[in-house]
Amino acid sequence: MEEEYKNAMEFSKYRQTLAIQRKTLKEKIDAKLTYGFNGGIFKIDRNLLNFVEMLIYKDRSENVVVLDANENPILVEDLVKFRDEIFDRYFSASFEYYEEYQKIKKSRSVESLVS
Amino acid sequence: MNKGVLIFANNNRQIDYAKMAVVSGSLAAKHLKVPVSLATDETTVAWMKQSGQWQEALTVFDKIIAKNTPQDLQQRKFFDGPTSTTAPFKNSTRPSAWSVTPYERTLLIDCDYFIMSDALNEYWEVDSPLLISDQYNDIQDQSRAGWLDSYVSDTGVKLLWATTVMFTKNDETKIFFDLVEHIRKNYRRFADVYRFDNRIYRNDIAFGIAKHILYGFETDKGYSLPSVLSVPDQDMIVDVENGAIKVLSKNLNDYTLCSIKDRDIHLMNKQAVLRNIDKIKETV
């Protein structure tokens, strides 16, 4: 029984470290998906990516007003350039997220989680 | 508009804030690629020269602004994991940031705030003359944070984290910093109104109240800096390896090992920072 409890405590420690590492990784990626543009702050997410792509598809790619994360209207003169920038950032951040998440997932001890 | 980082560091007998500021300044310059200046006092400068830090400081800092040593000393408890010491706490010069900064757009940071990413670069051009972080972000999770990490008192207004402040030097921000100084000078009177604990002057409280007053006695819902990822002083730094800071983070009866890498981090255990300062410096 003593041994079982000891194992449970060790696993609990591993889960605590895992939770912190996942939290800080998620926040790191959130920071990478924050984009300061023309006086506003945009959160690059699927909504923004879709909305911008839709506007371009509808031939609205110059002097477009897009609401930023604080719901403030921000003028985007060249929406294609803006789209390319947010797509680049999104792919680079999400790929980094995937890679680091895989590392965390495969780590089976506290030591490997923090190394 | 020229921009740069400003760090305040005023040593006391127990804590070498200047030593932290040199490393904090190096990291800020490396990741944000902007000049960094130090606001300090003559006693701290004398110590930097005596302890051999001065030459390095001259290479790190764009400008070193030394004013008179602040006299209004207050004592506070500095935790170092489970132990603590009481030492003078010289934080009263922060409201002078507006007048001492050499930059038009300034990022003001505490010397125990270590910039390990370029995340704050997104905020230089934000259309707001004053950005302050309005949220504490505990390394573990928000369950360790208390009400007083978010509000100045049980019934008071929102607390702001003066650990990171970005401002444009203009008339509006002058009013703000003048008001912060007014609150500092009349701290007890404001404590009666806002019902906060006035035993130790805290910039976080003064900044929170000043912003509340200036924004029409309302909570400002405008732009702010990102939450301040913090390692409280009851946690311990155990090592720095491959750019990762390893921390023993306190739980109810135990500690959890975790690591932080590529994140801007507020390390509140000053003694632990100083014990590991050479290793943190290696990440520059």
Image: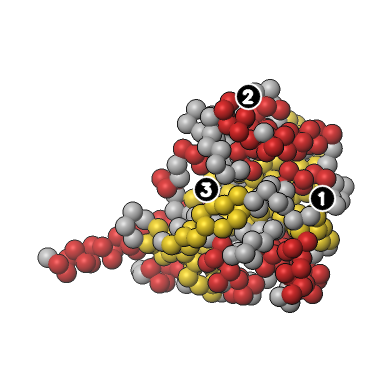
Q: Which residue is mark 3?
A: B137
Front-lying residue, B176 or B229: B176
Looking at marks 3 and 1 on the same chain, the residue that comes earlier in the sequence is marked by: 1
Up/down of B154 relative to B46, above or below: above
Q: CA distance from mark 1 to mark 2?
A: 28 Å
SS category of the residue bearing label 2: loop
User: Which residue is tagged 1?
Assistant: B101
Q: Residues within 10 Å of mark 2 (few under 14, many from 20)?
A: few
Amino acid type indicated by mark 2: Glu
Tell me the residue that label 2 is attached to. Answer: B218
Query: In this orientation, which residue lies closer to the viewer: B254 or B187?
Result: B187
Query: SS of the residue at dot 3?
Result: strand
- The answer, for residue B66, to whether it is visible in the render is yes
Asked if both marks, 3 and 1, belong to the same chain, the answer given is yes
**Dot placed on the residue nearer the N-terminal end, 2 or 3:** 3
Total label count? 3
Same chain? Circles 1 and 2 = yes
